[in-house]
Structure formats: structure tokens, C-alpha cells
Amino acid sequence: MPTIDTYLENHYIHRSNWLRAAVLGANDGIISVSSLAIGIATASTTRDPILLATIASLVAGALSMAAGEYVSVSSQTDIEKADIKREAKELKEMPEMEMQMLAQIYEQRGLKKETAMLVAKELTEHDPLAAHVRDELGITDTNQANPIQAALASGGAFTVGGILPLLVVLFAPIENMEYYLYGFTIISLVILGAVSAKTGGSSISKAIVRIVIWGTIAMGLSAFVGYIFGVNV
């Protein structure tokens, strides 16, 4: 007979935190590094400037993504901890009012007033802080922020994504390199969109269309800038 854990494994929400950071990092790595490489390629007749710009973009982008994600998620974690601490203080100072508030929450979700109060009392007897953190603040183990996990996922994914256009810069012919970069990037984005949608249990076609459109816009604008300046570097 299937257990509760088995049913939970069939859902994808528990993957949302690291999947969001990983998809954002890989997508940013592919698009930003490719876009910069395309911009330089349209204004250069030699490989060295394109290679230098691509490597610099890859290293700087990966470090920036990891640091930015860590700082951002750490700020969220600080807010969550402060709210939990405040809630614990309120439970000590006015436990009856807090239980009434918990009962109101359950009542608003559809329980009868008597049932809502009964549930609030039983959960308060079991673990009042956990009940308020989950149902009043909306903080659960699933959505609780993890700065280290988010930073590693985002920075690592950016590196993996950025290596793909770097390989094109290393091995593709210098002539019309921007077209090779664009084609290879679109293929990479399609694969990324499909994998992320499959991992998250969402629509594959919608993910692919979304990621390809915005990737094309970014690379097209970068190429346009290169053509505008049109200087050989």
C-alpha cells in the first residue's frame, strides 16, 4: 500500500527552490555569454577578442550569480527568522489571542467555527509555534529559503550554461560565428526548457517557447549593437 511519502514524491513543489535557481543560472549563462560573444563577433574579424570576452563573461557571470543569489536568499532567510522570533514572543505574551487567530485562519479556509477552534487547540497543544509558522506566516520546509543551496545551484548552472557558447567560440569557424552561436544557443535553450519543464512537471512546449523567444530577443539586441558600432577589434 502506498505511503504518504510516496504520494508526496509524485508532486514537484518540493523542487521549486533549487530548480528555480538552477534554471535561472543555466538560462542566464547560455543567453548572457552567447549574447556578449555574438555582439563581439559581429564587430571582430579575429577569434581572440571573442574568446577573451566569452571567458571573462563566464567567470564574472558565474561569480555574480552565486553571490547575488546568496545575498538575496539570505535576506529572505533573515526576514523569515525575524518573523518566527516575533511569533514565538507573541505566543508567550498572548497565547489565547494567538489561538483565536489560528482558529480564524482555519475558519476562513472552510472549517466550521467549532471545528476550526478544535483544530487550533489540538495543534496548539502539539506544537503551537510550528502551527503558526506554517499557517499564519506561510513558512514550510518546502518553501523555506536555503542560501547556500540556491547560490551553488545558480552559480554552477550558470557555469554549465556558459560553457556551451564557449565551446562554439573555441571550435566554430570565425566567419559567420554569430550565426553558429545563435543556432547552438537556440538548441541549448530548447533542451534546457524541456528538461526544466520535465523536472518541474509543467508544460514542455510553453517552457520552450518562453525561453527561446526571450533568448532570441537578447541575442538579437546584442548583435544589433555590434553592427551599429561596427568596429574591428
Image (cartoon, rainbow, N blue to C red):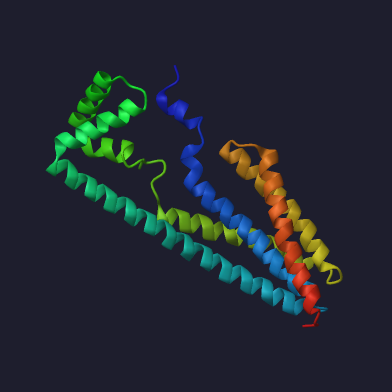
Foreground residue among 47 and 16: 16
The structure residue drawn at horizontal position 53% and vertical position 47%, both measured from the top left corner, is 19
**On the picture, is 75 further left or further right than 99?**
right
- Residue lying farthest right? 175
The structure residue drawn at horizontal position 32% and vertical position 42%, both measured from the top left corner, is 137
The structure residue drawn at horizontal position 68% and vertical position 75%, both measured from the top left corner, is 53
- Establish if 151 lies above or below 42: above
- Residue lying farthest left? 93
**On the picture, is 33 further left or further right than 12?**
right
Give the image location of residue 145, x and y in percent: 40, 50
Give the image location of residue 88, x and y in percent: 20, 45
Examine the image and state in which quarter residue 27 appears.
Answer: bottom right
Quadrant where the N terminus lies?
top left
Give the image location of residue 185, x and y in percent: 73, 57
**On the picture, is 98 further left or further right than 145?**
left
Figure disc tally: 0
**On the picture, is 230 further left or further right than 11?**
right
* One can see residue 99 in this view: yes
* One can see residue 170 in this view: no
Examine the image and state in which quarter residue 2 appears.
Answer: top left
The structure residue drawn at horizontal position 81% and vertical position 62%, both measured from the top left corner, is 180
Give the image location of residue 160, x and y in percent: 61, 58
Quadrant where the C terminus lies?
bottom right
- Establish if 176 lies above or below 107: below
